[in-house]
Image (cartoon, coloured by chain):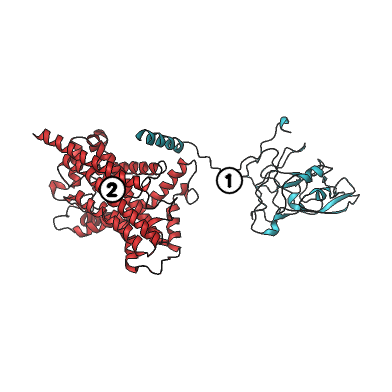
Amino acid sequence: MFKQIIKGMATTLKYGFSKPITMQWPEEQKPVMPRHRGRHILHRYDNGLEKCIGCELCAGACPVGCIYVGSAENDPANPVSPGERFAERYEINLMRCIFCGYCAEACPTEAITLGPRYDLADYRRERTVVTKEDLLEAWPKFERGKTGHLRGAGGDQRENPKETGPGISPKVAWEPMTNRTHEAPLPGEQGISKDVPSVIDPPSEDDR
Amino acid sequence: MMLASFIDSAKDFLFNSFGGATVGEGGDPILVFVVKLVIALLGLTTVAAYLTWAERKIAARIQLRLGPNRVGPFGLMQPLADAIKLMFKENTAPAGRDKFLFLVGPCLAGGAAIFAFATIPLSAVNHGVQGSYDFHWSLAHLNVGLLFILAVTSLGVYSLFLGGWSANSKYSLLGGLRSSAQLISYEMAVAFALIGTVILAGSLDLEKIVEAQGRSAWFIVMQPLAFLLYFTGALAETNRAPFDLPEAETELVAGYHTEYSSMRFGFYFLGEYINVFTVCAIATTLFLGGWLPIVPFLSFIPGVFWFLGKVIVLVMIIMWIRWTLPRLRYDRLMSFGWKVMLPLGLLNIIITGAVVAFQAA
C-alpha cells in the first residue's frame, strides 16, 4: 500500500512542478490553424478595389440562408469594385452561420473567405449580425472605404476605438495567408491596438 | 524630532506595558494576554484565509492549471474577495432548525481549533534580566498542555454534530453522524500516538517536550511510527482527504453543513483550515522539534520562523495528499481506524515504555 501511495504522491509532485497548460486568453492568443474556418472576411484587390461584385452567389449557396447581399451599380468614374456592380450592403447572421465555407466555394472572385477569428460571442443579439463594415478587409491607404465606412475588418469599427467590447474587439489581427502581396496592417495601425499579438505566424510558401 | 520622540514614547509604552521587564512583578499580565490573544486570533484567521488560497494554488498546479491569479498579484487578494462574497450572500436557514444550536455549531468549528492552539509554544521562553520575568510564546502556558490539547480538540466533534443535528435535515443529520463516528474513532488513535512522546519527554508541558527534543533528537527520529499514526489520524480529525467522508464534496451534498450558507458556512470553512494549521502545529511541536533549528549553527534565525516554517511544510504536505489520494470507503475507514491505527498505537506505547524502562534500569 505504501508503495502505491508514494508512487501517486510522486506523480502529483511531478505535475505540480511542471508548467501549467492554461492559456491566459485574451491576453495570450493561441494561433489558429491556417485553414481555420472562423468569421468571414471580404477581401480587396491589391489596388484597394473590393473583390466582391455583388452577384449574390454566396447567398444562394448558403445552406442556412444567413447571407444578405444588397448590390448596387458601380459609378464608372469612381468604382468600388472592378465589376459592373458592387455590394452596397453585405450582412451575415452569425447566429445562423454554420461556417461550412460554401460561400467561399461559390464566390467567383474569391472575395469572401472564412478567417481566423473565433471570438464571436456578444451581449447583444443585433451585434451578431455582422455588416460590411465588420467584414471588409482593412486597407492601409484608405481612412474610409469607398462606401464611406470607417476602416475595415480587423480594425476597430467605432468612432472611439478605446471602447473595446465583445463582438468587435480590435484584438484580431487577420489572416495574412491569402494571396496578397501588400503588407497587412500591423498592430498599432489601422485601429488595431499595439499590444495585440499576431494571431498567426506569417505562412511559408508550403502552407498555401 | 517629533518622529523620534514619538517612537521613543511608543517604545516606552510597549516595553513597559506588554513584553517588558515589569511583567510578572507588578506589570499588567492581563494586557499582555489580551494583546497575545488579539494577535493569535487575527493571525489564525488570516492564516486560515490564506490557506484556502494556498490550497487552490497547489490544487491548480497539480492539475496543470494556474489557480486564482486575477485578484491582486498572484491572486493574493482572493481570500479577501471570497470573504466579501460570503458575507454578502443570503444567510438561508431551514425553518425547523434549533435556532441556538444552529449558531453554536459554526462558532465551535473554529473555536475548538483556536483553543487547541492556545497552549502551543511558538518559541523558547524569553527570560528577562536575571530571570525577572518569563515571556512565554504561547497564549497560555500550561504544565499539562498536551492533555489540554487532547481535551479541546474533542470539542470539534460537537461543532460537526450540533451543526448536523440542529438543522432539522436528514442529510445534515446523517453527515453529522458519520463525522462524529469518524472523529471519535480516530481521536483514540491520535491520543495513543502522542503518548509515546510524553513517555520520552517525561512531561505533558509542551515547552519541556520541545526542550527534551533539543537534548536528544527530534521525536520523529525516535518515534517514526507514532508520527505516521498522528499524521494519518490528524488528516481524519480535520476531515481532510483521504478521510474527508463527512464532506465528500464529489459524492454527497455536503454532509453536516448542508444547510449552512453565507458566513455561517464560512466559519466551518475557516474552522477546517484553522484546524489544519493547529494540527500541523501540534505535530511540529511534538515530533519536529518545535522552534529548534534543523542544525545547531542555524540557531541565529529566531525560533518563531523555524516553527512556522515547519508548520507550513506540513500543511503543504497535507494539501499535496488531498490532491493525490482517493477517498476511503466508509467501512474501510472505520476498520482502518480501529483495527490498524489503534493496535499500532498501543504497540508503540508498549515498545517505547519498555525501552525507556530498560534504559532507566
Q: Given the image, what chain letter belongs to the residue carrying mark 2?
A: B
Horizontal and vertical percent for residue B88? 45, 63
Q: Given the image, what chain letter belongs to the residue carrying mark 1?
A: A
Looking at the rendered structure, whether the residues under marks 1 and 2 are on a common chain is answered as no
* Label 2: how many Cα within 10 Å (few below 14, some 14–19, many 20+): many
Q: Which residue is mark 2?
A: B186
* Chain letter, colour red: B
Cβ atoms under marks 1 and 2 closer than 8 Å: no
Q: Amino acid at mark 2?
A: Tyr
- On the rendered structure, is B233 left or right of A197? left
In the drawing, what numbered circle is on residue A27?
1
The colour with which the image depicts chain A is: cyan
Tell me if residue B6 can be seen: no
- The quadrant in which the N terminus of chain A is found is top left
- On the rendered structure, is B243 left or right of A82? left
Q: Quadrant of residue B174?
A: bottom left
Nearer-the-camera pick, B339 or B168: B339
Q: Amino acid at mark 1?
A: Glu
Q: Nearer the viewer, mark 1 or mark 2?
A: 2
